[in-house]
Image (spheres, grey):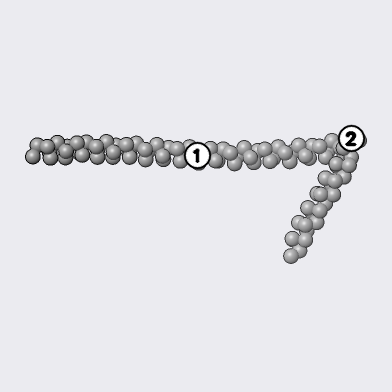
């Protein structure tokens, strides 16, 4: 009989330990998920910042070329043509 009681106590101890580990891992998982969401948000912000900076850089290149620099005239003409096509697409979409 005492052997059975010992086994039950051992089982209870293991179950308590298991539940304790479960709660710890559950809390840790919540923290990690929250950190992942924060990092995803930061990544999106950085990607937007990079995209904005790239646009500004491209506009600066075009402005610099139009300003009188003769080094990238072909590139500037291509960029202007691209911008005109984009404007035309927008106008067509507005008329639809």
Q: Residue at the left extreme?
A: 1
Q: Is residue 21 left or right of residue 67?
A: left
Note whether 92 is above or below 81 in the view shown.
below
Secondary element under disc 1, as helix, strand or loop, is helix
Count of numbered marks: 2
Q: Which residue is mark 1?
A: 36
- N-terminal of the pair, mark 2 or mark 1, is 1
Residue 90: x %, y % from top left? 76, 56
Front residue of 2/74: it is 2
Residue toward you, 36 or 90: 36
Q: Report the quarter where the C terminus lies.
A: bottom right
Crowd rating for badge 2 (residues with CA inside 10 Å; few <14, some 14–19, many 20+): few
Residue position for label 2: 71
User: Which secondary structure, mark 2?
Assistant: loop
Q: Is residue 38 left or right of residue 58?
A: left
- Identified at 22% across, 36% down, the residue is 13
- x 85%, y 46%: residue: 78
Residue 16, by quadrant, is top left
Residue 49 on image: x %, y % = 65, 38
Callout 1: 10 Å neighbours few (<14), some, many (20+)? Answer: few
Q: Quadrant of residue 10?
A: top left
Q: Position of residue 26 (x, y in %)?
A: 37, 40
Q: Residue at x 80, y 56 (%)?
A: 88
Of residues 34 and 18, the one nearer the viewer is 18
Marks 2 and 1 sit apart, C-alpha to C-alpha, by 46 Å
Q: Residue 92's spot in the image, x, y percent?
A: 77, 61
């Amino acid at each position: 009989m005492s052997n059975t009681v010992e086994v039950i106590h051992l089982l209870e101890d293991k179950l308590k330990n298991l539940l304790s580990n479960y709660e710890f891992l559950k809390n840790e998982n919540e923290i990690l998920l929250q950190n992942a969401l924060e990092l995803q948000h930061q990544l999106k912000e950085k990607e937007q910042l990079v995209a904005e900076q790239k646009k500004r850089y491209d506009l600066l290149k075009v402005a610099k070329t139009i300003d009188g620099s003769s080094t990238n005239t072909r590139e500037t003409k291509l960029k202007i043509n691209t911008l005109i096509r984009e404007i035309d697409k927008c106008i067509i979409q507005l008329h639809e």
